[in-house]
Amino acid sequence: MPLDEKGEKMAAKEKNSVLEQVCRILTRENFITPEEQLRMLEQLRKE
């Protein structure tokens, strides 16, 4: 695997990890419902 591709995959994983944390915080602070959180997390995993 070329170095560029490896870096892109790592960056994408890191971005998704941050977005997953944001989803959890939004749910914890009652900005979104648990159902909305699940939908958002599913969408992130598809990308």
Image (spheres, rainbow, N blue to C red):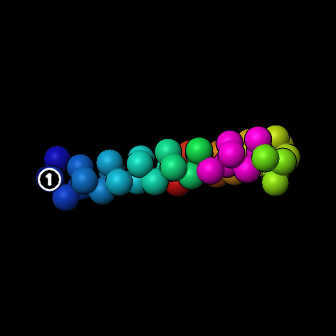
Residue 8 percent across, percent down from the top left: 30, 56
Q: Is residue 37 left or right of residue 10?
A: right
Q: Is residue 41 magenta?
A: no
Magenta region, residue range = 22-28
Q: Position of residue 45 (x, y in %)?
A: 56, 45
SS of the residue under disc 1: loop
* Residue 21 in sight in this render: yes
Residue beneath the point at 59% across and 44% down: 21
Q: Main secondary structure of the magenta part?
A: helix
Is there any visible trace of residue 39 in the rendered image? Answer: no
- The residue at the point 33 percent across, 50 percent down is 9
8 or 33, which lies in front?
33
Q: Position of residue 19 (x, y in %)?
A: 56, 52
- Please name the residue shown 73% across and 50% down the image: 26
Q: Residue at the left extreme?
A: 2
* Residue wearing tag 1: 2
Q: Position of residue 36 (x, y in %)?
A: 80, 49
- Is 18 on the left or on the right of 2, as rendered? right
x 62%, y 50%: residue: 22
